[in-house]
Amino acid sequence: MGKKDQENVEAEIEVEVVPWHALTAEETIMKLRAKETLLQGGLSDAEAAQRLEEYGYNKLSEGEKETIWQKIWKQIANVLVGILVTIGLISAARAIVEEFMTPRDGQIVLTSWVQVGLITTVIVVNTYIGIKQEGSAEEAAEALKNMLSADARVIRSGEEKMVPADQVVPGDVVILSLGDRVPADIRLTESANLACGEAALTGEAVPIDKETQKIDIPAGSNPEQIALGDRRNMCFSATLVAQGSGVGIAVTTGDYTQIGTINRLVSQVEKKKTNVLEQIDQVSKLLAVLILIATIVTFFIAKFSADQGWFEAVSTALVCCVAMIPEGLEAIVTLTYAWATTNMAKKNAIIRALPAVETLGSVTVICSDKTGTLTQNLMSLTAFVTSNSHYKFDVNATQRVPSNFVREDEYLSERAQHQSGKSASAVVADGANSGAPRKGHLESSNHYSIDTSLHPVEDESDEPKSAPSSGPFANGASPDLAFVKDALTPGVLCSKCKLGKNGTREGEIGNPTEISILRASYFSGIDIDTLKSEQPFHAEVPFSSEYKFMATIHDAGDADTFTVYVKGAPDRMVKLCSQQARGGVLSDLEPCDTNYWIEKIAILSSHGLRVLALCQGTVPRDSVEAGENLGPEFVNGRAEGKWLTIVGLCAIMDPPRPECVQAIAEAKGAGVRVAMITGDHKDTATAIGHMLGIVDEKYSTAVTGPELDAMSDEEIQEVVMTHNVFARASPQNKIRIVKALQAKRQITSMTGDGVNDAPALKAADMGVAMGKEGTDVAREASEMILADDNFATIVTAVREGRVVWDNLRKVLMINTPINNAQGMSVLFGLAFGLKESPLSPIQVLYSNLICAITLGFVSAIEPAEDGIMDLPPRRIGKRLIGRYLLLRILLATFTLTGLVVAAAFWLKSKNPPGTDLMSMNDKGKEGYADQKYFQEHIRALSFNVLDFGAISVTLSARFTYLSSIHPRVFKGNKYAWYSVFIVAALQIFCTYVPGVNNIIFQMTSMDGFMWLIVLVMTIAVFLVMEAEKAFRSYMQFRGVDTEDKNYGMFDNPMEGQTDTSGGLLPKGASKLNLVALEK
């Protein structure tokens, strides 16, 4: 039903779930409380108005949207931004107070306002970036609303009229025509060859034929468990009428349509923080405490040791505070994710929530659909079997030549190992030719399936099967065009299908299994149009699922006979054949060896292949009228009984994507299991698994959905650790598989394309939806979308996820020591005897900002280091900062701090002994006439040692273990050198440009000796970091866990064990707040 009071989006209304598809038209009318004459006259205008009042408008309700001010507050409501705001206010207060001082110090006023400006810029930039990355859920909901119909044709008060679609109400009689978008969920009462494209809901690419009878529900089943695609008497809101026309009764509108359930799903996106965000928060809290301590210590040293005034001491302490605040860290981490998602988008992996990238690096199991993801989603003829030979076809062929067929008699010559020893009918029942429907569907997707209950496929005698004789072409050779043309002509002419443009799927029409024969013919060099013109169509026996074959009658030029081409289920065709074409040559006939063909059917079925038999015969010309639609008895009820000649068997499958084989091997090398979940039959799944390398000695068998249904949760938890192939699986099975893997502490990625896959995608740690063939609901329930529906893209994304983790560690390795050194230099400079801070407030703010957005950012976009996919996945509970990373940060911090302070005292030592540093404004005062270097020189030197030392830290941190004293340091990341150049150029600019150096930065230009000190200190920082790297590499060689792979003091090994009801990692945060203020 529709939603009452649509404006109140938070109201929860209990509405009876009615299985409309299981009701007759009369029962539907009664359930809707409508008149018995509803179908004749529709609702009256008054009734429609009353129902509109009762159910509300036929539109999707909208959740409350955040205002821009709420979004801004979310970005700035954290401790570190609060500290920055406090410092900015104090700087502004100092500038204002100085305005009224006598004498007024214009330099203090200027630098204070510059400081306020820099702080404001930092906060604004970070806030903008955060807001920019939000809103994916709102955009998703808007995309769904755009799918809804604008107008609808209804019958009201006995008249047919157009009304706005949002005014359609339950009980309206709706008329549907070709091209219409269905305005509501509709129970059909009339159908004239009606079919609707429901890919947006079900993922089925082929339009669904509609009917009007109620759906019979199997005994003991819940009507709601019937798949949407099998509810053939229903049309669903937002789907398109692909053919025909129809009439139906609107039964649900607004939020209670199937598309409405999608809207509710995507409107309830959880905004949780992922592991990295929580860790960054923890780091920030720790830093806030350390910053507070350092600020207090600096204040006391400045006041009581350096004898600074109260205001000046506070200012000096705030300089230390500003220096240590990682205000750029938020932007860098966000940009790290954004850069990674941009790179992945170029490789067809679209990330919907930035921090979901982090989860990719932890994935231990990838659960993938088969069709279209691991396979090409392109039914292809892979083999053609004649009476004595096997021809293998190159399914990846791009050239139109008969040599795409090669005779390989060993190819598919024996049953698959797991089917050896079984009867032929048992093999067929297990495989792709079974008439059993896919799990969750009422009908089989194979129109030419073998119904073993009606036609047992067994040997007709105990005689040995005929041994193969020599064929027209040697084993290993390719046939000529004439042979291929004769062999495949029955499949080409006995078809109503249309091949796509240049043999592709673009514009193709018809059953994919039949089109596979047309495609093989096309790529063998056959001119299909010419062939059809050479043998004009005369009459046909249309295909029916009852007798599972079709036949077409053609004029091949014979004066007395027409040629009949028949294509159908091989069990039925073999029983109608009296002859066979020896080796596929139609001019050389021999008696049909039924036993041989039955065994070949069993062999091909055991490998998961669909099988079609191609046959032909002749009938007198006067026995068929032109254009006549004949019944099945024309083929299977003839007086002569067996009258056809079997040409061969077509073995058809959806072949694996070639790139997936390498991708799966790469995933294995990275310690990532690949599991295949499919609705296909066990044999098909197992055969594909073998080809892809998913099935091996360790994971040698498949398990089916019905088998999973019979298991307890504990049993499934064991099964998911010993099987990689899950066949005949339903969406409900997917959820249980995900939960079982998570219970075993596996980080799981799950792919899906249909509406029923959404719960599994939400439950998985990393939901992956299909971009081409997938549904909107699947895409909006996922964290990642595959634009090319290709499994190999997932492995590429896993690689990128690992790169992001590595780069985030490099971000911390670079930014944390640089920030710390900026504050520590002030603290230790004063502690060791300097009367003034070695760095001015503007220098500190500038260094903080420029190093973060240049040097800090380039570490975020480093390419993958060699061997990144040779490492196992990151363990649950691991933290960004481990023991060795902490040691590296501390080493870099104290090295850089020590060298900045040492440089200041080195320069100070060049002045006459016993003199304190003076400002250049005091130059020439008594006792200081011989002073060579002043406070401004110290600040210039400290400023350059700090920032050039930061360059050294950055260049060394680019590689975790490999030495940066190597030509590789100049390669791989051009932005690293762009950043080095920018920082260096700006240092020169700030140091030498008058007004900038002395007024804004409170320093002066440098001489050659000072630059020599900068060079020495820069090289020293670089060598210390490289020495640490060499020592760590040596320790790793000795077997020490220098990668922090094992759990340490900072890690949480219990993470993921306390609650297995959901994912092991938090999902889906779309923004980054460093420290959220507690309400």
Image (spheres, rainbow, N blue to C red):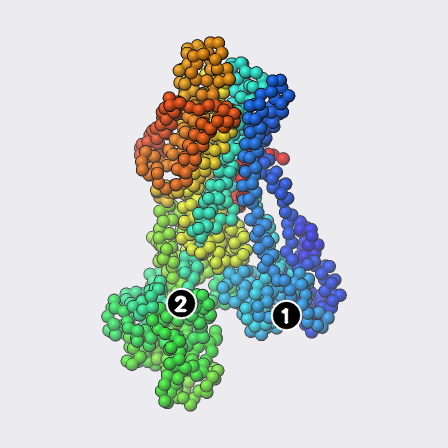
Q: Which residue is mark 1?
A: 175
- Look at 43% across and 33% down and name the residue there: 985
The amino acid pointed to by label 1 is: Ile
The amino acid pointed to by label 2 is: Asn
Q: Nearer the viewer, mark 1 or mark 2?
A: 2
Is 785 situated above or below 647? above
- Look at 48% across and 9% down and name the residue there: 926
x%, y% of residue 912? 41, 11
- Look at 68% across and 62% down and name the residue there: 167
Left or right of 855? Residue 215 is: right
Name the foreground residue: 269 vs 122. Answer: 122
Is 231 situated above or below 124? below
Q: Is residue 84 visible?
A: no
x%, y% of residue 573? 39, 76
Q: Dot 1: what SS?
A: strand
- The Cα atoms of the two marked residues, 1 and 2, are separated by 38 Å
Residue 250 sits in quarter:
bottom right
What quarter of the picture does the C terminus occupy? top right
x%, y% of residue 166? 66, 61
Q: Which mark is residue 502?
A: 2
- Look at 64% across and 44% down and name the residue there: 67
Q: Residues within 10 Å of mark 1 (few under 14, many from 20)?
A: many
Q: Which mark is residue 923?
A: none
